[in-house]
Image: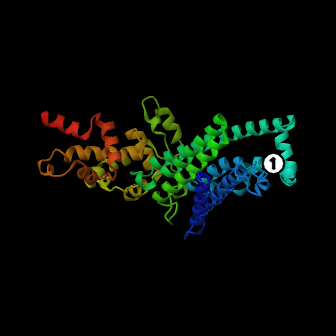
Amino acid sequence: MIYIIGIFTSLFLSIIILTKKGNNIADRILGIWMVLIALHLFAYFSYITKLPYHMSFVGINIPLPFLHGPFLYIYTLALCNPGRLKAGKLMIHIILPAVILLIVLPFSFLPSNEKLDIIEGNSKSSQLFSSALFMLLTFSAVYYVLITNKLLSEHRKRILNHFSSQERINLNWLRILFYGMALLWILIIFIRDDRWIFSAGSLFVVYMGYFGIKQAGIFTNKTIISDNELEPGLVSINPEDTVAGRPPQEKRKYAKSGLNTESSRSLHRELTLLMESEKLYTDAELTLFQLSSILKCQPNHLSQVINESEGVNFYDYINNLRIEEFKRLVLLPENQRFTLLSIAFECGFNSKSTFNRFFKKNTNLSPSEYIKKQRII
């Protein structure tokens, strides 16, 4: 029963994605991937239930596991950086499945009784072939998990240097796909039990459908922010690189930016005065590009100034200012009638979890603990 649910869910999701208004290249990749997942599940379901035509799938289903890693990576690339979707470069990702398909193609066209004899015969050559396939699949799984994780990490770094709020560009959908696929690869490599693997695969499809409906941009014509929508030329920075002892690395990163020391100091002064007077950080959707337009400077120069002068990325810089504004407002007598969350929203936060996380990071206290301590003082 669980396999039937997985098959129909995959097909249902593929129809929604491929027929939705304004679908893009990422949608089409995901839609095709859903069709392949449905085919993979159906091939296994037909085999275990011994459907009349189940042996016709034996052989052509062998390359299918080698397609899921490439599709996850290419789909992630299409969402994060569609500009890198070059047909020539992407062809390398289907070489292995294509080679395996060519190898098993003669076997696929054999009569059903001959296929069954080969499978049940369990000869030394078939055992060797199965072992080779398993080793290749293990390598493929590890490789695509690593490069997809790297792609997501790079994209998150770019986001932190462009946006003051991550709620608009939520990456939960991609994380769901990534962690779900990683779990399936673990089952494939270490458990090696088809019942567990395909049951988990069916649940994974239902899981994808549930979170895909909740995540804007998957089954609607809204889009997730991609690197192409980020200001070109902006240098990203890992938040971990802003700790003490890293200034030489930061200087090397911005060595060719064209912004000298005096200009950097001047821009930092302008930025500080603007934030003090206009409190632009109270805009929950403030972006680096918007702020650079107001300051009439290049976004990469503003990013450089924030990273070098403040020691944090744009995301942390704006949210730290919001925390300081909250600490000021929450102690004013006229604000005692408001809830802590309403004051936080007034300061520019649009998520309770983000507010609590930043407040704890800034003060090592929860908002209520901080207020209590201030009142005692």
- Residue 45 appears anywhere in the view: yes
Q: Is residue 57 left or right of residue 85?
A: right
| Residue 253 or residue 103, whichever sits in front | 103
Residue 230 in view of the camera: no
On the image, the x and y values in percent for residue 324 come to: 26, 43
Which residue sits furthest left?
A: 333
Q: Residue at x 32, y 45 (%)?
A: 355
Q: How many marks?
A: 1
Considering depth in this image, is 346 or 272 the residue closer to the camera? 346
Coloration of the structure image: rainbow
Dot 1, crowdedness within 10 Å: few (<14), some or many (≥20)?
A: few
286 left or right, relative to 77: left
Query: Where residue 154 appears, x then y in whole percent?
Result: 54, 45
Looking at the image, is 304 positioned above or below residue 15? above
Q: Residue furthest bottom?
A: 21
Mark 1 lies on a secondary structure that is helix
Residue holding disc 1: 99
The image position of residue 159, as x and y in percent, is 47, 49
Could you say where residue 295 lies in the image, as x and y percent from the top left?
37, 56
The amino acid on which the numbered mark 1 sits, given as a three-letter code, is Val
Q: Nearer the viewer, residue 114 or 7?
A: 114
Q: Quadrant of the C terminus?
A: top left
Point 53% across, 50% down: residue: 174
